[in-house]
Amino acid sequence: MKKYFAEMIGTMVLVLMGCGSAVFSGGIADTVGAGTGTLGVAFAFGLSVIAMAYTIGKISGCHINPAITLGVWLSNRMSGKDAGMYMLFQVIGAILGSTLLYLLVSTGSHAGPTTTGSNSFSEGMMAQAFIAEALFTFIFVLVVLGVTSKGAENNLAGLAIGLTLVLIHIVCIPITGTSVNPARSIGPALFQGGEALSQLWLFIVAPLLGAAIAAFTWKAIDEKN
């Protein structure tokens, strides 16, 4: 159970810190520093991944994302049982992280444009959102599979993965708020309700599709296969 609990804690931290940055300081940054803007939120997510990678990586591999777990499973690097349990505890961790954010917001003020950090897309932009989430998850999972493969510079894997997530957020935040992680979307959507829940399917299906394509792509190009 240790690796499952590690995934739960890691995902909780990711949601608390990443979504928390959007909730409390995600406004457009101005000359007096009233908000962190897109760049600040992007780095909050990326730094959260880096911190957790070097904290729980030795225990669970630090997936903290069902899309990554799916990619790892499809690459034959873990069992179906472990993959299912990873995903379950990742979702639990995301809900815990969102619960802590809800408690913080409900007991004080916040300066960001959102109260939960939930993902969303504008009316008529569903196709763009789906393509973006599938495409950026594909890139993200492909990087994860590559830097954690045999023969890669694994000591720098956490840094490479975290910085890739920063890059993805910089591009994708204006489109969907950036998910590329079904658990990260589920937790905030449960507290946001309404439109966030009605759109949640996209932030589950598109990342998982992108992850599956990444796994098959990596198997096709990896020299070890």
Image: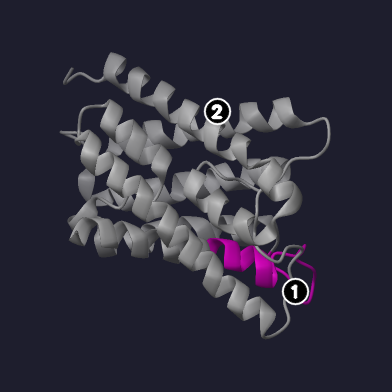
Is any atom of residue 17 visible in this view?
A: no
Residue drawn 28% across and 50% down?
156
Is any atom of residue 210 visible in this view?
A: yes
Q: Is residue 183 left or right of residue 115?
A: left
Quadrant housing residue 35: bottom right
Percent across and percent down for residue 40 are 62, 62
What color scheme is it? Answer: one colour
Q: Is residue 51 left or right of residue 82?
A: right
Residue drawn 83% across and 30% down?
124
Position above or below: 138 against 51: above
Residues drawn in magenta = 18-36
Amino acid of disc 1:
Ala
Front-most of residues 45 and 83: 83
Q: Answer whether residue 26 is magenta in the image.
A: yes
Quadrant housing residue 107: bottom right
Position above or below: 143 against 114: above
Q: Is residue 77 left or right of residue 214?
A: left
Amino acid of disc 2:
Leu
Question: Tags 1 and 2 in contact by the CB under 8 Å rule?
Answer: no
Percent across and percent down for residue 144 are 34, 38
Percent across and percent down for residue 76 are 21, 28
Please, what secondary structure does the residue beneath circle 1 have?
A: loop
Residue drawn 26% across and 27% down?
75
Q: Which residue is mark 1?
A: 111
User: Separation of disc 1 and disc 2 at Cα?
Assistant: 31 Å
Q: Answer whether residue 182 is magenta in the image.
A: no
Q: Earlier in the sequence, mark 1 or mark 2?
A: 1
Query: Where the C terminus falls, by quadrant?
Result: top left
Q: Which mark is residue 135?
A: 2
